[in-house]
Image (cartoon, grey):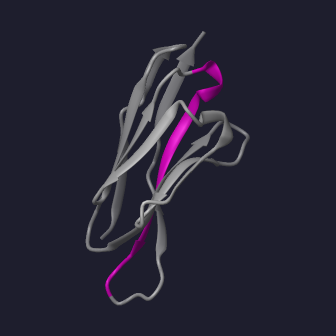
Amino acid sequence: QVQVAESGGGLVQAGGSLRLSCEASGSFTVIAMGWYRQIPGNERELIADISADGSIRYADPVKGRFTIARDGATSHLQMNALKPDDTGTYHCKASLRTPGNRYATHYWGRGTLVTVSS
């Protein structure tokens, strides 16, 4: 059974840094891993993702401040120069192909809360 779990959220002052981690467990091939932010009343929005071939995308507001990396089934999001607008619940999405399946399935973690105070 595939599980995805995030860690590393917390409270930080504006200008500070946090490092989020996401670990997927089970039997699968990683196609891509990504981070999404959600605030109450809004849909989840892409922050950054990284594919198996190393291609990376960042949302415009975080370019130059956030860095995504992947090592096997673990992804990290290094967040620097944090702003109050970065506040939200950060969810990891792992796109994984499990044995016997031709296509990947998206698996979501429960999220980790990031709060940036001004």
**Residue at screen point 48% across, 73% down:** 105
Q: Is residue 43 above or below residue 61?
A: below
Q: Residue at x 40, y 66 (%)?
A: 52
* Left or right: 86 as drawn, with respect to 105: right
Of residues 91 and 77, the one nearer the viewer is 77
Residue 91 sits inside the magenta stretch: yes
Magenta-colored span: 83-99
Q: Nearer the viewer, residue 98 or 65?
A: 65
Q: Residue at x 58, y 32 (%)?
A: 88
Position of the N terminus, as image quadrant, is bottom left
Question: Is the residue 46 above or below the residue 51 in the image?
Answer: above
Image location (x, y in percent) of residue 64 = 55, 33
Q: Position of residue 92 (x, y in %)?
A: 46, 50
Where residue 32 appears, as percent x and y from the top left, is 45, 64
Left or right of 57 in this view: 25: left
How many labels sit on residues?
0
Residue 38 x/y as whole percent: 62, 41
Q: Is residue 90 magenta?
A: yes
Left or right: where 72 falls relative to 44: left
The quadrant of the rendering that contains the C terminus is top right
